[in-house]
Image: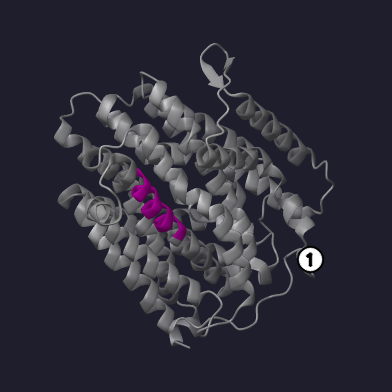
Amino acid sequence: MLDIQKRMSNGFFALLSLPATAMGFALSVQISALSWILSTKYGLDIHEIGIVWAAGPIAGIVAQPIVGVLSDNIWFLGGRRRPWILLGGLLTGLMLLALPNLGILQRVFTDGGPDGLLALAVVVALTLDLSINVSFNPTRSIIADCTDRSQRSKGYTWMQTVSGTFGVLAYLIAVIWGNETLIYVGVVIALLFTILPMIFIEEPRHLEKESSAGAKGKTSVKDIVVSLLPLYGFLVYGIYVIIAKLFGLEDTSSISLFGAFHLSTVELVCVIIELLCIMAVLANVSREKENTHEFQKILLAHSFTWWGVQTMNIYMFFYVSTVITGLTPESMQSVNSWAFLVRDLVGALLPVLVLNEIAKRRGMTPTHTGAILLMAAGYAAIYLFGSNIIAFFIALAVVGIGWASLVSLPFAIMSERVDQSKMGLYMGIFNLSVVLPQLVASFKMGEVVSAAQDKSVIFLICALCLALSGLLWLFVKNDKK
C-alpha cells in the first residue's frame, strides 16, 4: 500500500479519482462530439440522433446492477472493482477510436447505405455507453470502499474536482482543435487513467457489513423491487420504448394535453404511474424502514434532475444553431463547446473549494438541494434571455453550480443510506435514476424538440425538471449529525 493511501492524503484522493475521471472525460467527449459528428459528418436527423443516444441507457439498465452485484462478490486480479475498471476503460478507448471512423467501418461491415450507418452508429454508441456504464459503477464504488463515512464527502467532491477539471480540458480541446482531436485525446485518457491507478490503489479485502442504520443480511428481490418504486413510471416507459423500437409496435394514438402537448395512450399511462409513485414515496405508503424510504426519495429526486440535464446534453447543439442570434455556421460548434466548458469549469472549481465546506457545516442534502434549485433558475434564465449570447453564458455559469453538486454529492448522500458491503449493487440501482430518465430525454423529448419551431423549449423542459427535482430533494432527510 502506498504511503499516501495509508495517510489518506490529498494525493491519494486525487489518484482515487482518476478512474472516474477517465469515464467522465469519455462522457464529456460523448456530450460534446456525438450529436455534432452524427449530424454534420454522417447526416443523421434529430430523431435518429435521439435513437443513438438512447442505445447506451438501454444497455445501462441491465449492465449497471449486474456489474454492481458481480463486483460486490467477486475478487479477481487483486480487487473487486479493478477488473471492471480495466475492462470498461479498454472498451471505452476502442469505441471512442471507432466514433470518427464510422465511415470506414460502414464500408467494411455494411452495404454502405444510410440505414447501415444508423445501425452502425447505434452499435458503437451502445458499446461506448455500455463501457462507460460498466466502469462508472466500480469507479464510484471504489471511492466508497476506500474511505469511511467521515471521508465520503471529501472523496466524492475530490472526484468531481479532478474529473471536472479534465472535463473543462475536454471542451477546451474541442474549442481550440476541434471535436475530432478531442475524441483521440479521449482514447488516451480512457486507457491511461483506468490502467495506471489500478496498479497503485489497494482495495480493502473486507467491507463494512452494515449500513448506518444497522441493516444486515442479504438483499432480497423484494428489497430491490421496493427500492425501485420511485422509478416505475420511467421503467414502464423504458420497456415500452424498447419493445416499440425493436418490434415496431409503437402506440400511434394521440391525446392532447393543454392543446399543445401530445401523448400516446401508453405515455399517458406512464405519466399517471409516475405521479402515483411520487405520492406513494412521499407518503411512504409501503411503510418502509427509514433508510429504504430515504433511498427511495433520493432516487425520485435524482431522476428528474437527469431528465432535465440530459435534455440539455443531447439537444444543446440544435438550440445554439437556431436560437442564439448572430452566429455563423462555423461558429456554432465553437459556441456549443464553450457552453459545456463554462458549465464544467464552474462544476470543477466548486466541489472541493466550496461545496465540501458548506456540506460540512450544513449537511450534504441541503447543500445539494440549494444547488439544484439554482440550476433550475439558470435554465429558466436561458429560456427567457438565452438568445443573447452574453446572457446565455452567464446563465450557464449558474447552471454549473448545480452541475458541480449533481456529479459529486448525490453519491455521498446515497452511500450513507445503504449497506456498505453491497455498494456496487446499490450504485447500479442508483444509476437507473439516471439512465431511465435519459430514455425519456432521448425519445419523447426528441419528438417535442423536433416538432417545436422555437428550440427554446429545450431549456423550458430543463427548468421545469430541475425545479421539480429541487422540490423533491426538500423531502430528503438532512444527513448532518
Foreground residue, 233 or 358?
A: 233
In the shown orientation, is residue 92 left or right of residue 36? right
Q: Is residue 248 above or below residue 69?
A: above
Residue occupying the far front of the picture: 111
Callout 1: 10 Å neighbours few (<14), some, many (20+)? Answer: some
- Indicate the quadrant where residue 96 lies: bottom left
Number of numbered discs present? 1
The picture places residue 309, in percent across and down from the top left corner, at 46, 40
Q: Which residue occupies 27% across, 48% down?
A: 111
Residue 30 highlighted magenta (yes or no): no
Foreground residue, 330 or 59?
A: 59
Dominant SS type (magenta): helix
Which stretch is magenta? 118-130
Whether residue 352 is visible, yes or no, is: no
The picture places residue 104, in percent across and down from the top left corner, at 22, 55
Say which residue label 1 marks.
215
Residue 126 highlighted magenta (yes or no): yes
Foreground residue, 308 or 391?
A: 308
* Quadrant of the snapshot with the C terminus: bottom right
Q: Which residue occupies 44% across, 50% down?
A: 404
The picture places residue 8, in percent across and down from the top left corner, at 49, 78
In the shown orientation, is residue 107 left or right of residue 475? left
Instruction: Give SS at disc 1.
Output: loop
Q: Which residue occupies 44% across, 87% down?
A: 2
- Indicate the quadrant where residue 292 lies: bottom right
Q: Which residue occupies 33% across, 50% down?
A: 345
Whether residue 293 is visible, yes or no, is: yes
Residue occupying the far top of the picture: 259
Q: Amino acid at mark 1?
A: Ala
In the shown orientation, is residue 391 left or right of residue 266? left
